[in-house]
Amino acid sequence: MFLISYIVYKKVKLDSSSFLVASRGVPWPLVASSIAATELWAGSLLASAEGVFNWGIGGMWMYALPTPLSFTIFAVIAHRTRYLAPNGTTIGSWVKTRFGPSTHIIFCVVALYIMFVFTMFQVIGGASLFSGMFGISYTAAALVIGVVFVGYYLVAGMWSTLVTGFIQYFIVVLVLVIMVPMIYAKMGGVGNIFQMVSEQAVVHEQGNWLNLFRADGVINYFLLTFGGWGVIATMSNYAWQRAYAVEPKGVTKAMLFGGWSWMPMALVSSSVGLCGIALGLTGKLAVGTDVFPAVVGQLLPPGASIFLAVALLFAIYSTGTSYLGGFTALLASDFYEQYTGKKSSLKMLRVLSVVMGVLVVSCVVALQKVSLLDFMLACGVFIPTPFFSIVFGLYWKKTTKVAANVATVFTLAVALYMMFLTDLPLWITYVTCYVLSALLCVVISLIKPDNFDYEAMREKSIKALEAEGAGDRAAKLNM
Amino acid sequence: MMVGEGLFSGIIWFCYIYLIASCAFLTVNIVKQGFLSKKEEPKKPGA
């Protein structure tokens, strides 16, 4: 990873802008593979198998569908944003012009929290996994993971994450393409797996394991994954950075192919959960997350675990670097540059990345084996709350600053109350977030509507891009 | 909808082929278009 980053560093002209958004002309397939690699983290491989292990064959699409859907939604949003604010860098790039500083700060703080927690996920997931698999201390594993992904991000910033992201994506796919059919073959073929799952369904009285659209799974699993992660791309600053980094004509393609190329990795790894059911592992594992390693350990030679570990490690690195980049970009672009009026230097961005890396690893070490599930749940309600303020802000000229602020802050308060102080199912909280924020945004905007001029915003943005010396590229190309 | 053996096999192999096809598609396009940025458009005379 370091070597690849160094080669890239030697080939590109690196300054503070390209450190954050490459050159605004990156070929869309590279951005798509980077999105697929970033969305695939250790949890994706293990949790997708766990979903099927718990919910049967229906769990395959229930886990895999929300992420590509979120990138399909974001493809439309990203295209619009790149048109309106071609000089952007982050999620907050257009918000200050559209709504003013208060909304900008609210959106950026929410995005910052999501980026920080997601970067922590990678270190927590990686440290838990490798301390368990290889018996090394949790703290040492967290430090090594943190040092590696911060280290190669420093070499060439966004360029490092894009190019290494493709390599990591390719290797993870290769591991799955080789390992999963080996598992099928060891079990006597797919037909035999079906017979074994059918037998286990009878033994455990779980006829729904072979039901593709079981109602309880749709309510208690799909609505949870979709409610929490259905718009994750819109709230992930790493995705916004890529929307600004990609060649202007490839924005939509990069987002669509990124999300939908991630999906088969989740689907194929989730099929291992069916093998876990077939092998009769139900009720025999401490946690369902262990089903993938357990199946590999039971069926494949001892060395195969190394390939799984490599896939998991690469998944963690690609995601960790992308989120670290998203986090650093928010701090530099949306707080330092926006409110001091100064341009951040390359050196400053590198120092900021190191500080953030140290902060993330320190929090992980200080919390010691915090529950990933608790962290994910705490983060989940932050994702739907600002969604409609963003959508209406981009498309509806009547949307006001007050509406965007109230819709985000009030909905977040209601969501936190529902999550921590009531016993309501989480999917109800998610649905409430979407409905309430959309309703507040529309009603408050209609009371005293704004009349925003989107074309004026675009003109201003193009002038800013020309002032940076990059005008003849991104802004003027037809989208 | 209960899944029979044929549909079960179809789903499993569809996912596997989808994985290979999507990776091949992206890889071929990356190789064709290059890893690094597209060249900047040459400035128009007098611009």
Image: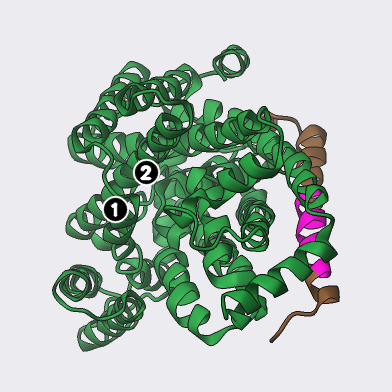
Chain colours: A green, B brown
Residue A101 on image: x %, y %: 19, 54
Q: Earlier in the sequence, mark 2 or mark 1?
A: 2
The residue that appears at 79% across and 41% down in the rendered structure is: B29
- Mark 1 surroundings: few (<14), some (14-19) or many (≥20) residues within 10 A: some
Identify the image quadrant of the C terminus of chain A: bottom right
**Closer-to-camera residue (A456/A95):** A95
Q: Secondary structure at mark 1?
A: helix
**Same-subunit check for callouts 2 and 1:** yes
As measured in the structure, the alpha-carbon distance from the residue carrying label 2 to the one carrying label 1 is 8 Å
Bounds of the magenta segment? B9-20
Give the residue type that dot 2 points to.
Phe
Quadrant housing residue A425: bottom left
Residue A156 on image: x %, y %: 50, 21
Q: Give the residue pinned by disc 2.
A: A121
The residue that appears at 32% across and 51% down in the rendered structure is: A114
Give the residue type that dot 1 points to.
Phe
Residue A322 on image: x %, y %: 46, 37
Q: Give the residue pinned by disc 1.
A: A375
Residue A152 shown in magenta = no
